[in-house]
Image (cartoon, grey):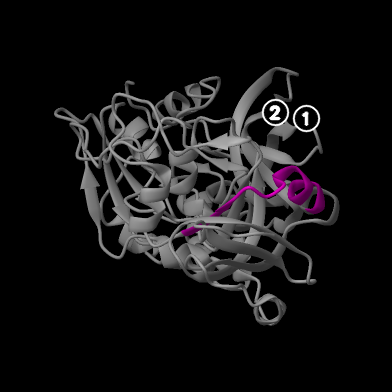
């Protein structure tokens, strides 16, 4: 490939296959798990800042990314950051077919390239993302390396092959512990009518917003808070958030969920929260071949009612029925679990993201169901 003024970049899979392209964002070499997202041209800001992508290099299947630029860091009336799902980029690296250089939007203050540069995250463009996605879909997600060099530098392919070969699967780490809050934080509306403790496994900010907008005081606590510490706040209910990685490594949160079930505490979980609640019920988890990541995933209820959902997970659960739970939703494509509910107690969780923004609004009613389970007025 002929490089001119552009920064050369190489995407290297662990088995030695590689793609050469043009770099943007930070100049560096990173390693991680390659996953693909079928989101359209909208939603790239939320994808970049979603803590559930921690440790992953995300491949966007939409051909053009960055067309509406990047808005400023602002907070809403509740003190929650607007436009983003956390306060920094969480993906390890970013892969697109084309990165838009001249965005157009009245709120835009910088380009996608500038955003990744200031956040020290590398990106690569002008590679065949369809071919890469086919590999990941047919063979499963893989680990590897992404390298972006200064202009004029010739990539060392042999060095990158060695780096990729030695890359460890980030899912062997407790990734949720790395993105969880380190201190207790509180959010509330002007006149809260209830109190919820949110166990932060890597929460998306729009989850907080949806809870606070329903007149709840939300107390966000670290991933390793004990049941006793949580209940010391005397909450009306407990929320277990989304987050990255293998749920089986979240030992403390699983123990919390066991206690929540035993004491019939009104509980709602999303994504990783669904998996943790299922494991607390005695179920088991397994890794999906290539995961569910995108904004148009269809799930179906036991009553055969369909919902379009936004999803981002690589693990799933089974065998939770022995703990008194039933499946309430499943994935229409592969039959995997998309939601559980206790048969007699006020606990439920879903595998997808009802709060997604941008995204389908089909499932926002689930937050109101949580309010009702706590015996509060919406």
Q: Residues within 10 Å of mark 2 (few under 14, many from 20)?
A: many
**Can you say whether 50 is above or below 341 in the image?**
below
> Per the image, is 19 magenta?
no
Out of 119 and 20, give the one closest to the viewer: 20
Percent across and percent down for residue 318 are 75, 50
**Can you say whether 325 is above or below 154 in the image?**
above
Q: Give the structural element (helix, strand or loop) at label 1.
A: loop
Q: Give the structural element (helix, strand or loop) at label 2.
A: strand
* Residue ID at (39%, 35%): 69
* Residue ID at (67%, 38%): 338
Classify residue 103 by image quadrant.
top left
Work out how far the residue at label 1 is from the one at label 2, CA to CA, in angstroms. 5 Å
- Report whether 63 appears left or right of 300: left
Classify residue 324 by image quadrant.
top right
Q: Residue furthest right?
A: 138
Q: Say if mark 1 contacts mark 2, CB within 8 Å.
A: yes
Out of 353 and 60, give the one closest to the viewer: 60
Percent across and percent down for residue 283 are 70, 55
- Report whether 196 appears left or right of 277: left
Q: Is residue 351 visible?
A: no
Sequence-wise, the earlier of marks 1 and 2 is: 2
Q: Residues within 10 Å of mark 1 (few under 14, many from 20)?
A: some
> Per the image, is 124 magenta?
yes
Residue 332 is tagged as 1
Percent across and percent down for residue 279 are 63, 57
Q: Which residues are magenta?
A: 122-135
Residue 299 is tagged as 2
Residue 321 is tagged as none
- Report whether 254 appears left or right of 207: right
Percent across and percent down for residue 200 are 40, 54
**Quadrant containing the N terminus in the rendered view:** bottom right
């Amino acid at each position: 490939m002929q490089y001119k003024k552009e920064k050369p970049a190489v995407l290297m899979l662990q088995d030695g296959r590689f793609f050469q392209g043009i770099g943007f964002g930070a100049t560096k070499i990173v390693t991680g798990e390659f996953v693909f997202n079928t989101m359209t041209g909208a939603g790239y800001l939320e994808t970049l800042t979603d803590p559930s992508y921690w440790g992953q290099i995300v491949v966007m299947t939409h051909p053009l990314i960055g067309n509406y630029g990047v808005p400023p860091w602002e907070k809403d009336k509740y003190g929650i950051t607007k436009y983003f799902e956390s306060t920094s980029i969480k993906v390890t690296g970013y892969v697109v077919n084309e990165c838009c250089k001249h965005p157009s939007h009245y709120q835009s203050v910088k380009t996608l390239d500038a955003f990744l540069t200031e956040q020290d995250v590398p990106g690569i463009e002008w590679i065949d993302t369809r071919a890469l996605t086919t590999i990941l879909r047919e063979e499963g997600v893989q680990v590897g390396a992404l390298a972006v060099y200064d202009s004029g530098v010739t990539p060392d392919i042999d060095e990158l092959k060695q780096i990729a070969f030695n890359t460890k699967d980030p899912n062997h780490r407790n990734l949720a512990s790395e993105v969880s809050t380190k201190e207790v934080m509180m959010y509330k509306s002007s006149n809260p009518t209830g109190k919820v403790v949110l166990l932060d496994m890597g929460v998306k900010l729009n989850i907080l917003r949806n809870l606070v907008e329903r007149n709840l005081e939300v107390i966000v606590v670290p991933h390793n808070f004990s049941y006793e510490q949580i209940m010391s706040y005397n909450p009306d209910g407990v929320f277990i958030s989304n987050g990255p990685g293998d749920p089986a490594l979240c030992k403390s949160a699983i123990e919390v969920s066991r206690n929540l079930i035993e004491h019939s505490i009104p509980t709602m979980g999303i994504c990783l929260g669904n998996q943790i609640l299922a494991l607390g019920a005695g179920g088991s988890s397994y890794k999906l071949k290539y995961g569910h990541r995108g904004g148009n995933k269809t799930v179906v209820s036991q009553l055969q009612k369909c919902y379009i959902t936004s999803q981002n997970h690589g693990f799933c659960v089974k065998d939770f029925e022995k703990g008194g739970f039933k499946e309430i939703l499943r994935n229409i494509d592969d039959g995997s679990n998309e939601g559980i509910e206790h048969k007699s107690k006020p606990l439920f969780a879903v595998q997808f993201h009802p709060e997604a923004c941008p995204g389908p609004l089909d499932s926002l009613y689930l937050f109101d169901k949580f309010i009702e389970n706590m015996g509060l007025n919406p």
